[in-house]
Image (spheres, helix red, strand yellow):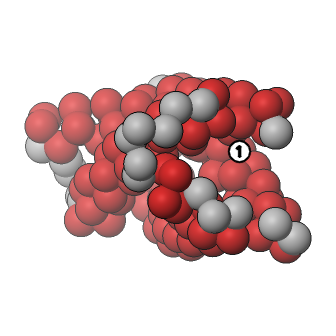
Amino acid sequence: MGWSIHLHLIAAISWIGGSVFMFVLGISLRDKEDQKLVYPRIGPIFGYFEIVVLILLITTGIWMIVQNNMIYTLFDFDVHSRVVEALRDKLLLVAIMTIITIVHTIIAFRTNGKERSRLETIISRGSSIGIFIMNFIVLHYAIVIRDIL
C-alpha cells in the first residue's frame, strides 16, 4: 500500500475533523447575525478544502483496492468474507455520502451570502447531519477492515 494508506488516513482525518468542526460551529452559532458573518467567509474555504480531501479519499481508496487486487473480488458477489463484505458496505456508504456531499455543496455555494428557501435550509441541514453521522459509520467499517487485516 505504501504512500496511499498514509494519504488516505490524512485525508480521512481532515474530512472527519472538518466535519466535526463545522458541526460544532453550527451548534454553537445560535445568533443569526453571527452566522451571517461567519458562514459566508469560512464556508467557501471549507467547501473547497473538503472537495479536495474527498477527491483524495476516493482516489487513494480506489488505488488501494486496485493495488491489492480486490477490484474483481469486490464485484464478484459469489465471494463472501468479512473483509469483502465490510469493504462493500463501506463503499456503498461512501457513495451515498458523496452524493449527499455534492447536493450539500451545490446548495451551499449557490446560496452563500444569500437567504435560503425553507427547502434549501432543510436539505442543507439534513445533509450536514447525514454527512456528520455517516462519517463515523464509514470510520467504523474502516476500523473493522483494518482489524481483520
Query: Which quadrant is the C terminus positioned in?
Result: top right
Q: In this view, does 51 lie to the left or right of 139?
A: left
Give amino acid for label 1: Gly
Q: Residues within 10 Å of mark 1 (few under 14, many from 20)?
A: some
What residue lies at 85% left-to-right and 73% top-to-bottom? 3
Query: Which quadrant is the N terminus positioned in?
Result: bottom right
Q: In this view, does 120 lie to the left or right of 1?
A: left
Q: Which of 24 and 85 is in front in this view?
A: 85
Q: Is residue 34 left or right of residue 17?
A: left
What residue lies at 82% left-to-right and 30% top-to-bottom? 147
Vertical position of residue 92 compared to residue 114: above or below: above
- The answer to which quarter of the image holds residue 5 is bottom right
Q: Which of 103 and 113 is in front in this view?
A: 103
Which residue of the protein is positioned furthest toward the front in this rendering?
78
| Residue 106 in sight | yes
Q: Name the residue under label 1.
A: 17
Vertical position of residue 4 compared to residue 101: above or below: below
Please state the horizontal and vertical placement of residue 53, each as a whole percent of the image. Answer: 61, 65
What residue lies at 52% left-to-right and 32% top-to-bottom? 80
Please state the horizontal and vertical placement of residue 20, each as a whole percent of the image. Answer: 64, 37
Secondary structure found at label 1: helix
- The answer to which quarter of the image holds residue 129 is top left
Q: Nearer the viewer, residue 138 or 127?
A: 138
Please state the horizontal and vertical placement of residue 85, each as a whole percent of the image. Answer: 53, 32
